[in-house]
Amino acid sequence: MRAIAVREFGGPEVLELTEMPEPGDRPGHLRLRTRLAGVNYADVHLREGTYPAPMPAPFIPGNEVLGVTEDGRRYVALSRGGGYAETAVVHRKLAFEVPDGVADHDAVALMLQGNTAWNLLFTDLRVTAEDTLLVPAAAGGVGSLAVQLAKHAGAKVVAMASSEEKRHTAVELGADAVVDSSTAEGLTERIVEAAGGPVSAALEMTGGDVFHATLAALTPRGRMSVFGAVTGVDGLVPITSLLAGSKAVSGFWLPNLYPSRTHLKDSMSALFAAVSDGWLKPLNGPVYKLGQARQAHHDLTARRTTGKVVLDVDR
């Protein structure tokens, strides 16, 4: 089968299109003929060797696939690598049959990014209509879904994005206010001004100065959920700031929910229903051929993409 292999850690250039043996059958798993593979920052960190659950090289990256079983049923699934290939073997507990009313690209957007957005909001932060929520990268995969989910829950949404085009997209998705996140200078003040005061809840995935600016923009007893650090810079938590404001900072990593019997099952059911009902619209990004995996990674990390980035494995 055709697949993308990583034989050593490094930049996008280590992604190699090659022929590899098909994976063997495993108990409790499904064999899928892959149609689409999601491209995520988790794949970037796996490629670099910086992911919280690293994989030894050589390996096939890709933690998110949409494929078809031998009897023609469509499934979207999470995996520990193996997605950038024509055949994937995925655990049944992390595979969900796609309803007829949900398109392939939409289903992939719901799997990793949709489940992350849903559980950030409703499992970790417990967002309600009483909240003012700050959403970073609001035109990205997680952010675009978080904006819509929070608005549907009745929250006020302040969206951050790095370009005028992306901020316009956030407004179209339902954001009440937007903030330019292209620079961290004066970011706290701009967040508070856009929100009409401090925010009660915030998502954070940048790290460094943006982490501190977001923390400072929280109201007393505000809470922040950290689900990434794309700059690679830690946002060390100032204890005095937490104490003085009774603020809460939590970390969120979706794989910690994989052992749960209910969390992903419930969130996937809700996400599929929301798309079928028409009020949740995944923001579909660019589609690359399997052999363009290097370009897909380059564009993603350069923040040139909007919405869900996928590899079309059939091309």
Image: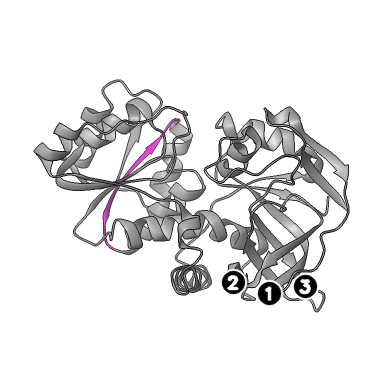
- Magenta region: which residues? 154-163
| Picture layout, residue 234 above or below residue 42 | above
Of marks 3 and 2, the one in the foreground: 2
Place of residue 256 in the rendered image (x, y in percent of width and height, measured from the top left): 46, 58
Q: CA distance from mark 2 to mark 1?
A: 8 Å
Residue behind mark 3: 69
Q: CA distance from mark 3 to mark 2?
A: 15 Å
Badge 3 or badge 2: first in the primary sequence = 3
Q: Which mark is residue 2?
A: none
Quarter-of-image position of residue 44: top right
Who's the residue at 19% across and 47% down the image? 222
Query: Residue flagged by tag 2: what amino acid is it?
Result: Lys
Residue behind mark 2: 93
Depth check: give the residue in front, 184 or 92. 92
Whether the magenta-drawn stretch holds residue 136 is answered as no
Depth check: give the residue in front, 37 or 30. 30
Place of residue 274 in the rendered image (x, y in percent of width and height, measured from the top left): 47, 69
Q: Main secondary structure of the magenta part?
A: strand
Mark 3 Cα-neighbour bin, 10 Å: few <14, some 14–19, many ≥20? few
Mark 2 in CB contact with mark 1 (< 8 angstroms): yes
Question: Tag 1's secondary structure?
Answer: loop
Question: Tag 3's secondary structure?
Answer: loop
Query: Residue flagged by tag 1: what amino acid is it?
Result: Gly
Who's the residue at 74% across and 28% down the image? 13
Place of residue 78 in the rendered image (x, y in percent of width and height, measured from the top left): 61, 60
| Picture layout, residue 58 above or below residue 24 | above
